Amino acid sequence: MRHLLDPTDLSTAEIDAIIERALDIIAHKEKYADACRGKKLATLFYEPSTRTRLSFTAAMMELGGNVLGFSDARSSSVSKGETVADTIRVVSAFADIVAMRHYKEGAPRVASEYSRIPIINAGDGGHSHPTQTMTDLLTIRRELGHFDHLTVGLCGDLKYGRTVHSLIKAMRRYEGVQFVLISPKELRLPDYMKNELGDNYRECSTLEEAMPLVDVLYMTRVQQERFADKAEYERLKDSFILDTEKMALGKPSMIVLHPLPRVNEITVEVDKDPRAAYFRQVENGKYVRMALIYTLLQWKEQAQPSALTPTATDCPCHNDRCISTTEPVEKKAYRDADGVLRCFYCDHSLG
Ligand code: CP
């Protein structure tokens, strides 16, 4: 069965096909009004969400299906100590497809190992958020018409920003795409993600330096919930703020994206600029999730193609945000292109 745990679970051709499906849904909504009649989506959200959970719900409703689940794991038997593995075995009996958000990295992968129905990762810790990436790609496609030869600026929390990590994994596969990284040094992109970029990136220390270079500016908030040290969060939270003066330095054709929620990293005056595409991006999230639910239910009989071949390991994962630190999962690892041994669940180095 096919799951969507990471953008790399989809080939470039499959990403393009899902984007085309979303465009067809936008153009012919009536054609899809009964496409999932009789099917049920379970939304299992162990971490807060506005856009992702509500857009999944709206997406399934517009496909004629039904939705069940929880928006707060404390109202479920998770609060009694039930594992992800057991929860998903139970939910497999009630639903046809799952959208899962979890604060532990790799939790949706663990769910996929015990599930009888497709799992969609709706965000796991600081690791991955593939449906946000599909939202971002649909927005770029609708706003700019293509992905090739774009320069993408990524600004803010590049260390914990799962939307950034997933967008890089998807966009780097298109020809001629360059990245500009703008972050405080404490929140720089992890090395394992920089390895994905090869020579196709540069780092800027100010937004002013980056603005004239980029076709897409992807702003992110500094994520308070990922910091163990709150004083460190307070020190870093105002590092990069996009305002109208900085917008004036950007190309007329540039677009500004943000996965939202915004805190203060984009001033509200910027919202009036037609290049601010982040609220149009939110609506695209519903259409692309319609396309994903529709497609994954059709792919239900297909085997999951795996770019990674994991093996059992004795090495524990030292990432305290990894699901393997709290669930009794089999320890698994894989070797990346540079031969580094990495945790199968959260991708952190086991060295
Ligand atoms: N972009 C995003 O994931 O938003 P939510 O946290 O509100 O779902």
Image (spheres, rainbow, N blue to C red):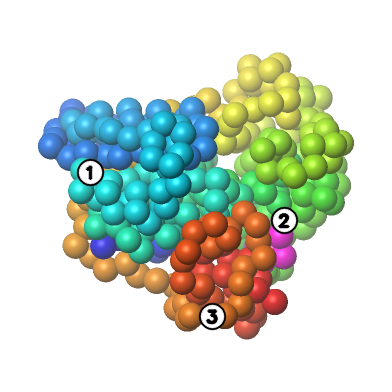
Q: Amino acid at mark 1?
A: Ala
Tell me: 339 left or right of 296. right
Badge 2: few (under 14), some or many (20 or more) residues near its Cα, within 10 Å?
Answer: many
Tell me: 112 left or right of 60. right
Q: Position of residue 164 (x, y in %)?
A: 61, 49
- The residue that disc 3 covers is 313
Residue 297 part of the magenta segment = no
At x 55%, y 51%, the residue is 104
Badge 1: few (under 14), some or many (20 or more) residues near its Cα, within 10 Å?
Answer: many
State whether residue 289 appears in this view.
Answer: yes
Q: Is disc 3 placed on a helix, strand or loop?
A: loop
Badge 3: few (under 14), some or many (20 or more) residues near its Cα, within 10 Å?
Answer: some
Q: CA distance from mark 3 to mark 2?
A: 27 Å
State whether residue 21 appears in this view.
Answer: no
Mark nearer the N terminus (1 vs 2): 1
Q: Quadrant of residue 169?
A: bottom right
Taking the view exactly as shown, the residue that stands out farthest to the front is 80
- The residue that disc 1 covers is 95
Q: Is disc 2 placed on a helix, strand or loop?
A: loop
Q: Amino acid at mark 3?
A: Thr
Q: Position of residue 182 (x, y in %)?
A: 77, 47
At x 64%, y 40%, the residue is 218
The magenta stretch is 189-194
Q: Is 158 above or below relative to 201?
A: above
At x 80%, y 42%, the residue is 229
Report the front residue among 159 and 209.
159
